[in-house]
Image (cartoon, rainbow, N blue to C red):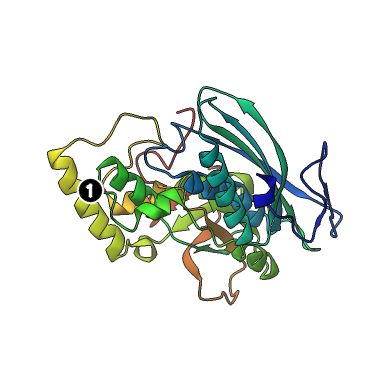
């Protein structure tokens, strides 16, 4: 199957030896790793093998972009049941390669093993191209907070799948998220002071920035108002739930609910990029300002508020909650 995973220009030694060799022009390597577990992050009755490949690649590629790096390569370890069709594995490979091609990266190696369910462990590598990494800890009072990419679409897709409404176009956002990878290096070049990819929910992930930076992030609900597509999906899911309870037959994520604003604030899995920028930064159109960074009052630690007030409920997905 390595024939379906062509190397890129940075791959000096690719698949076929004990390890790959990758050129690192910057002299530094951004590295991240992520799991994709069947029954937790995807279901094979919902997702094609290509969908799983796209999603597995996107999770790690987006983490590299959120550091301000250009994603360059993936290492993919696959554990699978012995009865898994070879055609499924080939299609998985095609999905991995296609998602990497969106950003000019490639799969340069990995490993295989036997397991009761499909498990992918993906390591992503990236190149900073001479720029300093954009950390979570650099946001300062007075900064703007902006986002590039959709919010709430993947959560809406999950809710639609759970409700059996598989024909809605938003389902694709759950099965194959499409992060704006090039927005990460773009943000770094624009002087972003902090950045993160929205994988667990906007409130949860901005909370990581707020705590690491020791600041308060104040979001403007008017700038986060769900669009017509999300509102339509919320009404469709609510109507379906009246007649049939949401699918609880697997542990894929948590029940996604039926409220469009909740999807936007806590949904995650779109892998949009959220960043803080110095006030006055002229942002390209794809970046939408959604709030501002404030100084916490008194001895209060970093956190996220909506229109100046804390929001009740979970801020997003927590694996151990």
Give the camera-side residue of 134 and 17: 17
Left or right of residue 231, residue 295 in this image: right
Q: Residue 47 in the image: x percent, y percent? A: 42, 43
As rendered, which of 50 and 159 lies closer to the eye? 50
Residue 291: tell me if it is visible.
yes
Image quarter of residue 164: top left
Which quarter of the figure has residue 188?
Answer: bottom right
The x and y percentages for residue 319 are 49, 31
From this viewpoint, is residue 152 visible? no
- Residue underneath mark 1: 237
- Residue 130, horizontal then vertical, whole percent: 81, 63
In this rendered view, identify the residue nearer to me: 288 or 60.
60
Callout 1: helix, strand or loop?
helix
Q: In this view, does 105 lie above or below 83?
A: below
Using residue 166 as the reference point, say whether residue 77 is left or right of it.
Answer: right
- Closest to the observer: 28 or 205? 28
Q: From this viewpoint, which residue is outermost toward the top? A: 116
**Other-residue count near label 1 (Cα within 10 Å), few / some / many at <14 / 14–19 / ≥20:** many
Quadrant location of the N terminus in the rendered image: top right
Looking at the rendering, in which quadrant would you find the C terminus?
top left
Q: Residue at x 79, y 50 (%)?
A: 29
Q: Which residue lies furthest to the left in this view?
A: 243
* Residue at image location 52% in from the left, 52% down from the top: 216
Residue drawn at (33%, 62%) of the image: 225
Give the answer, above or below, for where 244 lies relative to 4: above
Q: How many marks?
A: 1
Residue at 39% over, 54% down: 172
Q: Where is residue 189 in the image (x, y as percent from the top left)?
A: 70, 69
Q: In this rendering, is residue 114 above or below 3?
A: above
């Amino acid at each position: 199957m390595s024939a379906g995973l062509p190397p890129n220009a940075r791959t000096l030694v690719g698949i076929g030896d004990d390890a790959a060799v990758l050129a690192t022009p910057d002299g530094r390597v951004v590295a991240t790793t992520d799991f994709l577990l069947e029954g937790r992050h995807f279901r094979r009755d919902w997702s094609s093998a290509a969908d799983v490949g796209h999603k597995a690649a996107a999770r790690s590629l987006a983490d590299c972009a959120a550091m301000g790096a250009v994603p360059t390569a993936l290492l993919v370890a696959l554990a699978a049941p012995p009865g898994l069709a070879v055609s499924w594995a080939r299609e998985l490979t095609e999905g991995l390669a296609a998602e990497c091609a969106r950003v000019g990266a490639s799969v340069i190696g990995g490993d295989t093993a036997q397991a009761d369910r499909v498990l992918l462990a993906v390591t992503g590598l990236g190149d900073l191209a001479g720029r300093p990494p954009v950390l979570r800890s650099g946001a300062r009072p007075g900064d703007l907070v902006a986002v590039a990419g959709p919010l709430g679409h993947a959560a809406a897709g999950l809710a639609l799948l759970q409700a059996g409404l598989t024909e809605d176009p938003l389902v694709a956002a759950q099965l194959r998220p499409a992060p704006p990878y090039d927005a990460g290096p773009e943000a770094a070049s624009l002087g972003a002071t902090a950045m993160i990819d929205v994988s667990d929910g906007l409130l949860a992930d901005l909370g990581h920035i707020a705590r690491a930076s020791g600041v308060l992030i104040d979001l403007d609900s008017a700038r986060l108002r769900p669009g017509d597509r999300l509102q339509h999906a919320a009404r469709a899911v609510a109507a379906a739930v009246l007649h049939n309870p949401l699918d609880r037959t697997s542990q894929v994520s948590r029940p996604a609910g039926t409220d469009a604003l909740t999807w936007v604030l806590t949904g995650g899995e779109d892998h949009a990029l959220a960043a803080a920028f110095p006030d006055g930064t002229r942002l390209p159109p794809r970046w939408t300002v959604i709030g501002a960074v404030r100084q916490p009052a008194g001895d209060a630690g970093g956190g996220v508020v909506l229109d100046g007030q804390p929001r009740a409920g979970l801020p997003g997905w927590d694996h151990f909650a």
